Image (cartoon, rainbow, N blue to C red):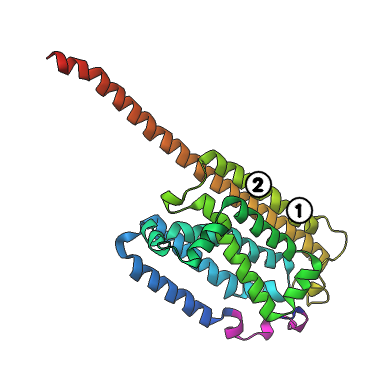
Amino acid sequence: MNHHHAKADLSHYSFFELYQPEILLLVLAAMYLYFRKTGTGATLLQKVSMMAALALVYVVKGSPLSIIGHHYLFSVHMVQMAILYLMIPPLVLYGIPERYWQQMLQGKTVWHHLFTFLTKPLIAIILFNALFSLYHLPLIFDTVSNAAVLHYVYHSILLITAFTMWWPVMTPVETNDQLSDIKKVGYIFANGVLMTPACALIMFADTQLYAAYEGVPQLFSYMPPHEDQHVGGVIMKIIQEVVYAFVLGLIFYRWVKKERIKDKEDLESIKQSALAPQHTIK
């Protein structure tokens, strides 16, 4: 995982190093299991959502993007972070039908209690953003980047907390929905605020923050490490804003849809009330 062991350029890597067929096989296996398990139980949009999530997993972890992000460009690493923690979790949460979530959440085991605790909105939002911000402190970033086991452990924990962070907004189980639509809007805005300091640290730093990317071979001469660092911070912030704006739009759409259904029910109730006395007279 040491960035300074990077080869001169991508041409020095083999096909298997660049495209990692073992990860592609895992993704294809996950797709097969998903379709076999859900069958006709998932809607077309849910299937598309899950396929998009799994395709993004391969792009981030199995394509040349993985090599570039790990060894050459911090900006590409930030693209990986944005996809892994801001895009894949909500796609997976939406892609799995409600009844399968209900089956997974049945019982009162230790894991169930832990899940309930970690998905409490305040706990979820603080835990994810705290781990995300700590990761981007230079000392922690360089330590994690240069220790393979620590790198995988930290990112695995961060991915889990990303799912718990998204759960209060994208809750696929109606009975587990803890937030009203207006509170979900506030939750999204709070997430954006809490993520801003880490992005700002990267965007406005006057020096190269991360030793992990110092002295690595430059794939693009027009993007030196310091400039690459600034671009990374900007990319993360832009992707975050786009994803959050999309989710806010989805929340608003659902709210309007609920209000229309409620209005129709109220109108139907009024009509029935108006017709009831006439029926009694007859």
The image quadrant that residue 5 belongs to is: bottom right
The vertical placement of 156 against 124, above or below, is: below
In the image, residue 63 sits, relative to residue 254, either above or below, namely below
Q: Position of residue 170 (x, y in %)?
A: 50, 52
Left or right side of 81 for 267 = left
User: Is 217 situated above or below 158?
Assistant: below
Q: Which mark is residue 190?
A: 2
Few, some or many residues within 10 Å of mark 2 (<14, 14–19, 20+): some
Q: What is the quadrant of residue 61 in the picture?
A: bottom right
Is 150 one of the magenta-colored residues? no
Residues at discs 1 and 2 in contact (Cβ within 8 Å): no
Residue nearest the viewer, comparing 257 with 103: 103
The answer to whether residue 176 is seen in the rendering is yes
Identify the residue under disc 1. Answer: 197
Image point (47%, 38%), residue name:
255
x, y percent for residue 124: 60, 56
Instruction: Tell me the amino acid under the disc marked 1.
Output: Pro
Residue 32 screen position, x and y as percent: 38, 73
Tell me the quarter of the picture where residue 276 sits: top left
Q: Earlier in the sequence, mark 1 or mark 2?
A: 2
Which residue is pictured at 52% across the width and 82% down the height? 22
